[in-house]
Image (cartoon, helix red, strand yellow):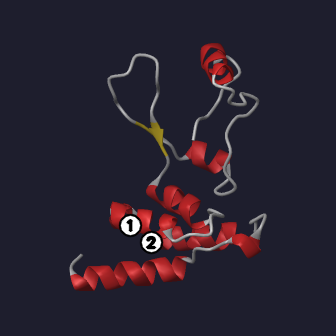
Amino acid sequence: MIRMEKEDVELRKLLRKYNINDDLKSVMELPPMEDVYEDMETLNVPFNNIKVELPSPELLIISKLFATRQTTKDMEDVLNSGILDHADINKLKMLYKEYRGYTVLPERRYNSLDDLLEDWENRKKKGR
């Protein structure tokens, strides 16, 4: 995910050079970008021209849960990354419930928070 600013002239030129549409800010159905931007953590990394920001663990998990790819890859990504160990599960449940009503294509949603948390608990019990 790249957050584009109008003044990112050089980045826009680079995108056009490779035939990538530069007429966008970012693309993600959920969580809403204003929520993501509000809850970003800036990483202290040794780059001169790049600012690296991360969404909260809860919002990153939400973005995977509301992906419309018809695959288990997003669930596996969350389970294998260990990010659930750093998430506030109550906040995650609240966000999931709130955002579920805003889904554009609910029939294409594949991932369930209940299933994810059940798989996570089962893995913890097995010591994985």
User: Which quadrant is the C terminus positioned in?
Assistant: bottom left
Residue at 35% x, 65% y is: 80
Please identify the quarter of the rendering in which residue 23 is found.
top right
Residue at the extreme left: 127
Count of residue discs:
2
- Where disc 1 sits, the SS reads helix
- Where disc 2 sits, the SS reads helix
The mark lying in front, picked from 2 and 1, is 1
Q: Is residue 105 left or right of residue 46?
A: right
> In 3D space, how far apart are the residues under numbered discs 2 and 1 (Cα atoms)?
8 Å
Residue 19 visible within the image: yes
Residue at 40% x, 81% y is: 119
Q: Which residue is mark 1?
A: 84
Q: Is residue 89 left or right of residue 100?
A: left
Residue at 47% x, 27% y is: 51
Find residue 111 and name its label. Answer: none
Q: Given the image, on which type of amino acid does mark 2 rest? A: Ile
Q: Given the image, on which type of amino acid does mark 1 rest? A: Leu
Residue at 50% x, 48% y is: 55
Residue 39 location (% of width, % of height):
53, 47
Residue 96 location (% of width, % of height):
60, 70
Q: Which residue is mark 2?
A: 89
User: Which quadrant is the N terminus positioned in?
Assistant: top right
